[in-house]
Amino acid sequence: MKSAVIVFPGSNCDRDIAVALEQASGKKPHMAFHKDTDLPDVDVIAVPGGFSYGDYLRCGAMAAHSPIMKVVKERAAKGVRVVGICNGFQIITEAGLLPGALIRNKSLKYVCRTVGLRVETTDSDFTRKYAKGQVIGIPVGHGEGNYVADEETLKRLEGEGLVAFRYAALPGQDAGQANPNGATNDIAGIFNAERNVLGMMPHPERAFDPLHGNTDGRAFFDSLVETLS
């Protein structure tokens, strides 16, 4: 499996996801800068977390107009798998690859902790090595992770099974504490209609190596490798 990681000014998770992709696939990802206007032939494009352009205007709003994003959108239209994580989710949503928006956390505070995620579907190249309904622990770190969309969009996402992950209580956790940001319907990640684009707020690359104290994110990368190698 060949992959690329997009690097913006302010990205701080680009190395994390590059390490996870390389360890899972055995191939070093291509690191593409935001000013680049082309990408090599790859199977997966990762738009990482961080604070692109300092989160000025809206999170991801400036990065969505970087030259490289035109290429990302073209590749996505051709079926290349694209995953946007945290700020990457914000960027690809601002770029129009996914519907809805990510707004300020309901608490108005930055949240950084491990949360429970329920896998809503295994019918995707990103989730096939999980079990449907499985609750995994994945770290989050964001101030604007509150997913919102209009009623028609929410109805379509729910009706077509395009919700990839939903916040859920971890063992011993009160259900009322499961959602860290107030996201509508507890939505933590969504697909586009073709299921080759995924946006998610939690960081599977931060739950990849045993040294992280948690490997619940490993199956995310193994799912891609199994499908695309």
Image: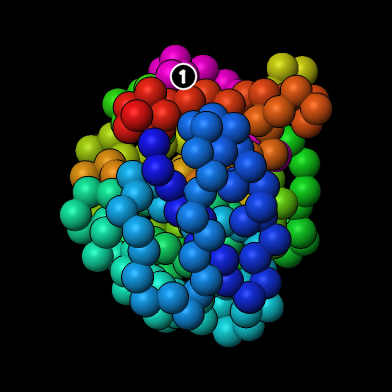
- Where is residue 114 shown, x and y percent of the image? 73, 36
Q: Is residue 27 above or below residue 56?
A: above
Q: Quadrant of the N terminus?
A: top left
Q: Amino acid at mark 1?
A: Tyr
Highlighted range, magenta: 129-139
Residue at image location 38% in from the left, 23% down from the top = 226
Residue at image location 58% in from the left, 61% down from the top = 87
* Residue holding disc 1: 130
Q: Quadrant of residue 24?
A: top right
Q: Is residue 50 left or right of residue 212?
A: left
- Badge 1 density bin: few <14, some 14–19, many ≥20, Cα 10 Å: many
Q: Nearer the viewer, residue 110 or 24?
A: 24
Q: Is residue 141 above or below residue 124?
A: below
- Where is residue 12 shown, x and y percent of the image? 70, 61
- Res. 176 visible in picture: no
Residue at image location 27% in from the left, 56% down from the top = 76
* Snapshot colouring: rainbow
Magenta-span inclusion, residue 175: no
Residue at image location 34% in from the left, 29% down from the top = 229
Q: Is residue 110 left or right of residue 198?
A: right
- Where is residue 142 shown, x and y percent of the image? 69, 57
Q: Is residue 80 above or below residue 149?
A: above
- Res. 138 visible in picture: yes
